[in-house]
Image: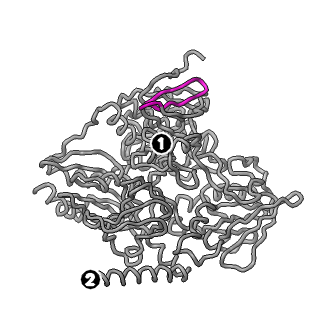
Amino acid sequence: MPDGIVDRLAQLTLFGDLRWPELEAVAHTFEEEVFGAGQRVLRQGISGGAFYVILEGEAVVVIDGEERSRLGRGDYFGEISALTGGVPVADIRAETLLRCLSLPGPQLEPFLLERPTVMLRMLQAEARRLRDSNRWQ
Amino acid sequence: MTGRPFPPGDYDVVVVGSGPGGLQTSYFLGRLGVRHAVLSADDGPGGMFRRFPLFERLISWTHATADVPLSSREFEAHDQNSLIADEPELRALVPTVLAEGRRRPAREEMEASLRAFAERGGIAVRYGSSWRSTRQDGDRLVLATDDGEYRCRAAVLAIGMTEPWVPEVPGLELAHHYVNVENRPDRYRDRRVVIVGKRNSAFEIGEGVVRQGVRELTLVSPRPPDLGRLARSPLRPWYLTAYDEHVRGAPGRYVLNASVERVERVGEGYRVHTLDPTRAEPLVLEADDVIAATGFEAPLRDLPGLGVATVLDGRLPALTPYFESLTLPGVYFAGNVTQAALGLRKHGVASVSSMVCGFRYNARILARQLAETLTGTRPERPPVPPDRVVPYLLSELDRAPELAMQKGYLARVLSAAAGEVRDEGILPLEVFVDGERDGVAATLEFDADEEIRPVLYVRRGGLLREAMLPPHPLRRYDALVYREALDDLLRPLLGG
């Protein structure tokens, strides 16, 4: 249905292995959400958050009020708390008008189990993050 | 045309629309003394209920046999369809027009109740006056209408989300959209019907054509029915005959998860080409009729060009928690378009702002916000003595219709500063959670297991804490366990 969204999904690394009808199904499974600059998307310590993929705009990761990193198109967040059942350890705050696709936390696990290539892409990204954070220590 | 109210001119607020959202907003603006005009393209009140729903009764309840008086605040939770008001004679109007024995209103009954609200409430509307275009002029918005120009500091667009929207699928324009479906009783008897879509309007039409004796009925769209959402959906018991019969294998009843690739005309009928990503072969459906129940959009006219950011392929404006355009200040929305203000959506649970029982409260919040920002009048925030805080919050959790209806979206908010607690009123939960002031917000939420639970958000010294309280089988929150939990949670805040 939202063809524009399907086109944009096709360009994101996370969904790089999916064929067109699969991308279309992804576009229909996720909801589109738009946030204004300064609005919070995920909230540190608050349960029930979703998994988000950024389509457009920039966001910052804020822990205890301190800005830690920046996110842009194709980046995603919320997967750790969605998969572990914990609460987010950071705020994600929109820096510009931020357009995201979202999937309610409890739906992420079945979504990934049905799409092993997306799960592998996510695992690779998490592995890189882990490696980079170990390197800093 | 003499005698019509609200001639073109300069107003603090211009409300566009005379459906439930427009009437409810005008009512509260009037109560707060905000000078405003109300314009409507229609020739009478009712908005979407002048046309919809086409076949079926509403999916929201009006339980006139409640154990509380019809004019009480508590009755609002028993009646999802009436507008709200301070005066008893304006409250609970749907039960007064509902046919004997019915629990859900028909379109005509909704329209009659809204007409009664406008008449008894003295809500003036300039009917037959269409908003055509918009421009900015300094700090004023200018709405051009058939009658002339209206200048205002804030526009409230209660324009509904009822314009047909059809995705770009080749040939789908050949189908009838939901809004253009003929409601003749035998229109679909013995026909093969394909409905594109699987949301409310698709299931409503499906139910309608099943009753007419449709021969074969197929609902098709890419997104599978979300069973978790369906469990909380008012659709479940009312419109789901087609789905129920599909699940149990009735011949000629199909609910398919597949994308519609194209629709073509073949002789007197249609061929609908679909593709299910889990199957190798495309599936071709033969039909006598194709109905596009593909959804609706808000008629935003020239607003996107003026910078109003949108979601869902331009179908809805992106909104702040106070229902203002995220990107064009001064442009506000009321009525079912306020569903675009998302709130926290914990566990994916959406507000019910698309329904009267949700947006009637949003309208009160919006009117209060406009009164405060435009006229500088600060609505009363009565102090709450520290020893009354816990009993007050418990009674709100127990009885407040706003919390019962708008779960996880609206909250009773108390602020705490310099040892003084004040009642900030019913607010979007997001406003408190993302704010900075110390205090407490009490709300009811669905948890991850879809149980309804009271939840408190307590901020002290800038640190926010979320506390989920246990569910109660009868949803009564005045028991000792809740009292003790609130005492513990609030003691630091109240300094006890």
Label 1: element kind: strand
Mark 1 burial class by Cα count in 10 Å: few <14, some 14-19, many 20+:
many
Q: Could you tell me which chain the residue with mark 1 belongs to?
A: B
Identify the main secondary structure in magenta.
strand
Kindly identify the residue that appears in the image at 66 percent across and 74 percent down. B248
Kindly identify the residue that appears in the image at 68 percent across and 59 percent down. B206
Residue B232 placement (x, y as % from top left)? 49, 63
Q: Amino acid at mark 1?
A: Phe
The reply to whether the magenta stretch includes residue B141 is yes
- Residues shaded magenta: B137-152
Residue B153 placement (x, y as % from top left)? 42, 31
> Which sits in the foreground, B465 or B100?
B465
Look at the image and tell me whether residue B468 can be seen: no
Kindly identify the residue that appears in the image at 52 percent across and 41 percent down. B306
Q: Amino acid at mark 2?
A: Gln
> Which sits in the foreground, A51 or A129?
A129
Mark 2 burial class by Cα count in 10 Å: few <14, some 14-19, many 20+:
few
Kindly identify the residue that appears in the image at 31 percent across and 84 percent down. A134
Q: Name the residue beneath numbered marker 1.
A: B333
Residue B218 placement (x, y as % from top left)? 72, 65
Extreme residue in the top direction? B2
Label 2: element kind: loop
Residue B3 placement (x, y as % from top left)? 55, 16
Q: CA distance from mark 1 to mark 2?
A: 50 Å
Q: Name the residue beneath numbered marker 2.
A: A137
Quarter occupied by residue B52: top right
Rendered view: B205 above or below A130: above
